[in-house]
Image (cartoon, grey):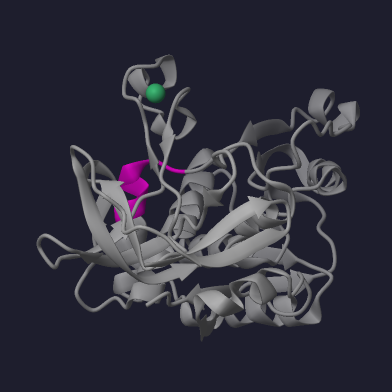
Amino acid sequence: MRAAVLHGPGELRIERVADPEPGPGEVLVHVEAATTSGTDVKMWRRGHPVLPPYPARFGHETAGTREDSGERVLVGDSLACGECRPCRAGRPQICRSPRWILGGFAEAIAAPEAVLHRVPDWLEPAGAAMAEPLAAALHAVGRAPARRLAPDAGVLGGGPMGQMLAALLVADGRTVTVADRHEERRAQAEALGAMASRSLADHDVVFEAVGRPDAWRAAVQACAPGGCVVFVGGCAAGTDARLPTRPLHYDEVDLRGSFHHAPVEVDRALALLADGSVGWRALAAGPIGLEQLAAALGAGNDGPARKWVVEPR
Ligand SMILES: [Zn+2]
């Protein structure tokens, strides 16, 4: 079969590789669609903590068909150990020794049966693949105070994650403002029912969806007294963000991290995509084949928020 293989930072090749051999408890899944994310761009450009040693497969938003049963599935991208302290506390998204399931940018992938989620019949593969990031957005909203306590939400960053957060917050009945310097992304946010601006100020809750230290600082400064900041965007490894102490102390601003998602949130995301509660087509670009993947990842971060739909087969 054909697969996208990383051989080093910036070095992506489309190669013929052996068909995956499912191990015990694993299933072969034929990939129908895999969507790109900011994490894929990081993995391709500079490597990533969860990327295995080179040569490495990647792609972690993957929908396809089980070879054994023909059932349509989303391939979850992680399997928590179930035994560590966070797992025992019911927080599998911060498992200390998760197994990452990467390799969606390929014609097929072997995955543990335990990470497969059934896709509703009427949801297309590209939409199903986007349940992975939407589950992370759901998790982030769940980390914030409830609407009653935080009716006015700001979202810093209008990329795909910012747009998904905005869609969920609007559906939750909150007043939402998305800040982004790109006009196209502000227009996308407005189409979701959010307001849009170039910056944020005085929100009950602020979601940081950029992943840079300056944005982390701006998110704290945009939070109202007594409010909460949820950090969704991961900064580069080893990054320190110098945060202003005044709002943390005198204004009792709460800071909460949000990472990844739990399996139950993936099922909720699939249901929201299937019943149209959250749209996905406005974020979809392509479809493209594996040969166009490197160009798509390198296309840059300007213009509208978009996720490339890769159809490897
Ligand atoms: Zn664990």
| Side (left or right) of 176 relative to 100 | right
Q: x and y percent of residue 70 in the render?
A: 13, 68
Position above or below: 186 against 173: below
Q: Residue at x 80, y 80 (%)?
A: 183
Q: From where the camera sits, is residue 148 visible?
A: no
Q: x and y percent of residue 194 in the render?
A: 63, 72
Report if residue 263 lies within the magenta region.
yes
Position above or below: 119 against 79: below
Q: Residue at x 37, y 31 (%)?
A: 80
Name the foreground residue: 138 vs 113: 113
Magenta-tinted stretch: 261-267
Q: x and y percent of residue 268 in the render?
A: 32, 55
Name the foreground residue: 92 vs 31: 31
Q: Residue at x 67, y 56 (%)?
A: 44
Position above or below: 295 against 6: below
In which quadrant of this rendering is ligand 1 seen?
top left
Question: Which quarter of the rendering shows the N terminus?
Answer: bottom left
Question: Which quarter of the rendering shows the C terminus?
Answer: bottom left
